[in-house]
Image: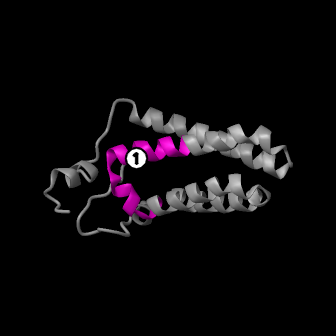
Amino acid sequence: MSENSRFFSLLFPKEPRTFPYRRVCMMTMRVAHILTSGVLFGGLVFDQAPASLMPWLWGAVLSGTIILAIDMHASCAILCEVRGVAIAIKMTLLMLVNVFWEQGILLLTIIMIVGVFSSHMSRKYRHRLIFFSDRIVTDERRG
């Protein structure tokens, strides 16, 4: 795919796209994501019934997916960055919680560790392109 193609430019714009209230939307989704993930983790730690935790599991999946979609709207470059790989790992592990419920505490602990490190590492590393570094521009905005 050529860097000059319309499709490439749509996926990987030279300047990240934005929309009104983007930052507010991201903050709101992060709050929802942290709350749902926290309740899910606490419920697993305190051995709550799986049926009572399913809404929290799907809330964490949905809020995380919306955060990813907002980031991908700016540029799909996130999928090629360290933080994008971390998101893929976290989403995969979160979906596995539904399959391997007995291992939920371990899976969520790994998710939290990956999330904390990927969210709080230096921007230099978090936004480092793993793939196509010579062809695309990252979105290094805050929020």
Percent across and percent down for residue 113 are: 64, 62
Residue 105: image quadrant is: bottom right
Say which residue appears at 15% left-offset and 55% top-offset.
Answer: 5
Foreground residue among 102 and 110:
102
Figure coloring: one colour
- Left/right placement of residue 110 relative to residue 71 reads right
Q: In the rendered image, is residue 143 in sight?
A: no
In the image, residue 64 lies in the stretch drawn in magenta: yes
Rendered view: 43 above or below 116: above
Say which residue appears at 79% left-offset and 45% top-offset.
Answer: 50
Rendered view: 3 above or below 10: below
- Left/right placement of residue 29 relative to residue 19 reads right
Q: Main secondary structure of the magenta part?
A: helix
Say which residue appears at 80% left-offset and 58% top-offset.
Answer: 102
Magenta segment: 63-83
The residue positioned farthest toward the front in the image shown: 99
As helix, strand or loop, the secondary structure at mark 1 comes to helix
The residue where tag 1 is placed is: 71
Rendered view: 119 above or below 35: below
- Left/right placement of residue 39 relative to residue 81 reads right
In the image, residue 10 lies in the stretch drawn in magenta: no
Q: In the rendered image, is residue 7 in sight?
A: yes
Percent across and percent down for residue 69 are: 43, 44
- Which amino acid lies under the numbered mark 1 shown in the image of this protein? Asp
Name the quadrant of the C terminus.
Answer: top left
Say which residue appears at 24% left-offset and 69% top-offset.
Answer: 134
Percent across and percent down for residue 101 are: 76, 55
Foreground residue among 85 and 21:
85
Percent across and percent down for residue 36 are: 66, 40
